[in-house]
Each structure stands twice: as C-alpha cells, then as structure tokens.
C-alpha cells in the first residue's frame, strides 16, 4: 500500500468510527440544509477563489474544484451523497468528481465559519423578501386609506365605540406600525450582512486568508471580525426573528379588527379571503385572517425556540447551533406569507360606508367632542366631563327608544339638563346650540380633529403623502440592497469564470 492510500485508508476508518452510528440521522442536518445549498456553493466558490488568489492553492487545483462545484450545482441538491450536513456532502461530491485535490477546498476553514456564512448569506434574501411583504401591505393600506380618507367609522377602546374616526385614519395607523417593522427588518439586515468566513473553527487560521476578499465576493458589507464571536453568535437570527415577531403581532391586530368589522357588517372580505363551513351552508368565515392572526404564535415560538437554544451556550461552537437555524427559517416563511395574505385581504376588502356612518354615532361616541367644546368656552375640562358623563347616563337609558332621526335632539336635551344640574345654567349660556349640534355629528366631530396625525380627511391626506414618501424610500433601499447582492453574484461568477 502506498503511503497516500494508507493515510486515506485510516481517514476512512476514522470517519466511519465517528459517523454517528445509530444516531446518524439525529446528527444530520442535511434535509434542513437544502435551504442553504446555493449559499454553500457560493461560499465554497468565494473561498476557493480567495485561496487561489492568495497562493494557498494552485490555480489548476482551484480550477478542478470550481468545475466540480459547477457539476454539483447542475446535478442538484437531491443528487448529493449522504453526509452529516450539506457542507460535508458537497465536499464529498467535489472529491468524487475532482479526486483528492477536491480535499483542498476545506483548507483554512471549518464548517463552523462555513455554516455561519451560509446562514447569513441565505437569510439576507429572506429578510429582503419579508421587507417586500411589508411594503406590499403598506401599499394596500395606503390605497384603501386613499379611497376612504373621509369615510367616517367608529373608533373603539376596550372594544366599545369610543370616538368617531375615519377609515383612512384607521388604516394609516397600521401603515405606520408596519412601516416601523420595515425599518426594524432593514436595521437587522445590516447586522446579518457581515461575513464570518475565515474565522475557521473559532481560532482563525495560520494560512494567509483574505477575509475582506471573501466578504466582498459574497456581497457582505463587512467582516464579522473576532473569529470566536463570528462562529459563536446567532444573535443576528434573534434580531431578525424578533423583528418578525413584532411584525406578526402588529398584523395579528389588523387581522383581528377585520374579523370583527366583517362580523358587524362594517367591512366585507372578498370571497377569495373567506371560507365556508362544511355543515352550515350560510356561513362566510374569515378563516384566512384568523390564520394571519395565529401566525404571531409561529413567530413568537421561533423567537422563544431561538433564545432557549442559545441561552447559556459556552464559547465557541456547539452543535446546539444546528437546531437554532430552523427556527429562523420557519419564522421568516410563516410571517412573510401571512403578511402577503394580509395585504391581499386589505386590498380586496370593501368598506360599508352606510353601516360605518351609522355605527360611528352609536354609544354617544361624540361625547368627548361636546366636553371639548365646553372646555373651549372656558368651563374647566373636569367640569365639562362631568356634564357629559351626567347626560350619558340618561342617554344610555333612553337611546334605544328614540327614533334615529331624533337622536341628536335627544342628546342635546340630555346635555342641557345636565348643564343645568352641574353648571347651574342652560347649555346655551356657555356654547351656541348650533356648535353643540355640530359636535354631536360624527362627521363634523371627525372634521374638527385636523391636527397632524388626526382623523380629519385633510389630516389623513397629509398622512397619506408622508406614508407614500416613506414607502418609496423603502422600495428604493430594497432595490439597492438586492442590486448589491445580484452584483456580487455576478462578480463571483466572473471570478470563477477565470479558472473554469
Ligand atoms: N451542520 C452544522 C450546523 O448547522 C455545521 C457545523 C458543524 N460543525 C461542527 N463542529 N460539528 O451547525
């Protein structure tokens, strides 16, 4: 036996000894690694190009490895040989094709920096897809808000009609919240976008690697510098999933509102976003939105799973990390899909203007406006509050017996009586009766609330303009970031093309 085949023989023995035995399947992440197949090929290519440029491997060897990688890619993930993970399987496939020289691919690196690089590489794309979903939802919200800038609707606190508002105002409230989710995702993206490659197992490598070069070839903005931190940390997963959990929580509230509004006939979901009952033929159920609402559970489960897996892990690499990654994939898939569905539901929902207007005045919802009016006339707000509170008891008792056309008059009389009792004079001694009647009208009540961010149609129109501006800026950033990734991809292909 030649010395070479003897050493290969002992390597095979060693690999067999540590192949996992009965726990082989338990050890393997190969199935879950399909997600990072393309990322691993890119990482391998960038690493090999850098090794050749640094003179760590010869150009012919690099060419043989890079050609083998092309073949592995063309054969697809399903054709990979068995292995503990995608990194081992690709390496085996490269050696199968290129011979022993293929074993040089793993010079000056470890699976530890490799996997961390692959996760970050792939996650960038997923985060940008999630950002795109938030932008889509914001667009749907803005469009509906534009159509309904002046549509009066009831606003609720504690699920009780509280004050009238406009559909435009309501929808923009979610647009702003989702806008912050876009920001949080972009913010997390910046910290995902750093390259651990070259950290090796954790202690760096004696080879003269160029970490900036591999970072550049993979489109990373920066290097994750400290080699121990670079392989150990998964805080970037936590950040992304936390941003997703926040987003899913925001969207769950929107879904809940729409379920509620559709139950009350205030809004109607398109049939495409509804479902029926298998036994009750008359039913149109908002199941899609209920699933959107429930996605907050997937996201918080992911966050919890990650934090629990990572808590107390010692430095540097531990195999626990393998089980952290799927939490991120599952969260990003579930939340992105739910946000896309929410956008579709919002874009296709219709708002019942008549029912909304009628509901907007229910439950003496303009009461606060009357108190404000008295306060503007110099009555201390606390006293004004008392007058309206006093009248609201009479109103609550009598309202259902009053014809709809007489409600406003009935409210006026109750207020007048309460003013006499609390302030010792008729209401007209403090405010013009016409002003009170206007304040009692939901549409006028809304129109008066026209300061920045308020529900008045003009304020909504202003809000729309700034929402559109911010969404356009978000779109631009998204396009830029995707272009950087596409450019890097092309550049890497060009560099590889110099060898093969
Ligand atoms: N499949 C592994 C993971 O996802 C790759 C790294 C394995 N490293 C090791 N030292 N066993 O973390």
Image (spheres, helix red, strand yellow):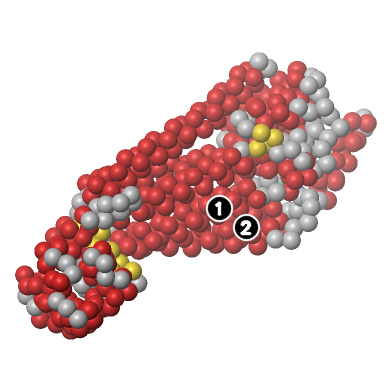
- Kind of element beneath mark 1: helix
Q: Are marks 2 and 1 in contact (CB under 8 Å)?
A: yes
Neighbours of disc 1 within 10 Å: few (<14), some (14-19), many (20+): many
Q: Which residue is mark 1?
A: 241
Quadrant including the C terminus: top right
Horizontal relation, residue 387 to residue 110: left or right: left
Residue 349 is labelled as none
Check the image and report above or below for 492 versus 267.
Answer: above
Residue 331 in percent (x, y) is at 52, 54
Residue drawn 68% across the image and 43% down it: 116
Instruction: Compare residues 121 and 29 and report the one nearer the observer.
Output: 121
Mark 2 surroundings: few (<14), some (14-19) or many (≥20) residues within 10 A? many
Q: Which residue is mark 2?
A: 306
In this picture, residue 472 sits left or right of residue 216:
left
Comes first in the chain, label 2 or label 1: 1
Q: CA distance from mark 2 to mark 1?
A: 9 Å
Q: Quadrant of residue 359?
A: bottom left
Q: Is residue 14 left or right of residue 65?
A: right
**Camera-nearest residue between 190 and 66:** 190
Residue at figure coordinates x 46%, y 43% from the top left: 131
């Amino acid at each position: 036996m030649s010395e070479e085949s003897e050493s290969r023989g002992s390597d095979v023995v060693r690999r067999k000894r540590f192949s996992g035995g009965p726990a082989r399947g338990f050890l393997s992440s190969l199935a879950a690694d399909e997600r990072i197949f393309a990322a691993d090929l890119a990482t391998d290519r960038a690493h090999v190009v850098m090794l050749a440029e640094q003179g760590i491997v010869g150009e012919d060897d690099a060419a043989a490895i890079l050609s083998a990688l092309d073949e592995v890619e063309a054969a697809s993930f399903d054709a990979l040989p068995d292995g503990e993970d995608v990194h081992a399987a690709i390496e085996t496939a490269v050696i199968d094709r290129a011979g022993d020289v293929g074993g040089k691919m793993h010079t000056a690196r470890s699976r530890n920096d490799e996997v961390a690089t692959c996760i970050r590489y792939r996650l960038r794309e997923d985060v940008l897809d999630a950002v795109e979903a938030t932008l889509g939802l914001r667009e749907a919200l803005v469009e509906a808000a534009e159509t309904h800038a002046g549509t009066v609707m009831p606003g609720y606190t504690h699920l009780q009609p509280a004050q009238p508002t406009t559909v435009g105002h309501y929808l923009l409230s979610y647009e702003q919240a989702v806008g912050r989710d876009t920001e949080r995702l972009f913010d997390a993206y910046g910290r995902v976008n750093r390259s651990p490659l070259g950290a090796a197992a954790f202690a760096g490598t004696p080879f003269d690697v160029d970490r900036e070069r591999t970072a550049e070839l993979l489109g990373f903005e920066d290097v994750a510098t400290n080699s121990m931190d670079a392989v150990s940390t998964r805080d970037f997963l936590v950040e992304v999933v936390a941003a997703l959990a926040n987003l899913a929580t925001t969207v769950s509230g929107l879904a809940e509102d729409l379920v509620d509004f559709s139950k009350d006939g205030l809004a109607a979901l398109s049939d495409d976003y509804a479902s029926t009952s298998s036994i009750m033929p008359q039913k149109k159920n908002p199941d899609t939105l209920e699933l959107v609402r429930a996605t907050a559970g997937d996201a918080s489960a992911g966050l919890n799973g990650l934090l629990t897996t990572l808590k107390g892990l010692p430095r540097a690499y531990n195999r626990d990390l393998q089980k952290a990654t799927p939490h991120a994939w599952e969260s990003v898939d579930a939340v992105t899909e739910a946000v896309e569905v929410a956008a579709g539901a919002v874009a296709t929902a219709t708002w019942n203007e008549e029912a909304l207007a009628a509901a907007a005045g229910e439950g003496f919802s303009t009461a606060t406006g009357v108190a404000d009016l008295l306060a503007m006339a110099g009555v201390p707000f606390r006293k004004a509050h008392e007058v309206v509170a006093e009248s609201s008891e009479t109103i609550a008792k009598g309202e259902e017996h009053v014809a709809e056309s007489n409600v406003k008059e009935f409210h006026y009389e109750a207020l007048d009586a309460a003013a006499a009792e609390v302030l010792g004079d008729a209401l007209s001694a403090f405010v013009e009766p016409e002003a009170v009647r206007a304040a009692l009208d939901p549409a006028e009540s809304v129109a008066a609330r026209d300061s920045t961010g308020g529900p008045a149609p003009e304020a909504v129109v202003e809000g729309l303009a700034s929402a559109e501006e911010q969404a356009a800026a978000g779109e631009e950033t998204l396009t830029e970031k995707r272009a950087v990734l596409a450019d890097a991809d092309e550049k890497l292909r060009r560099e590889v093309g110099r060898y093969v």
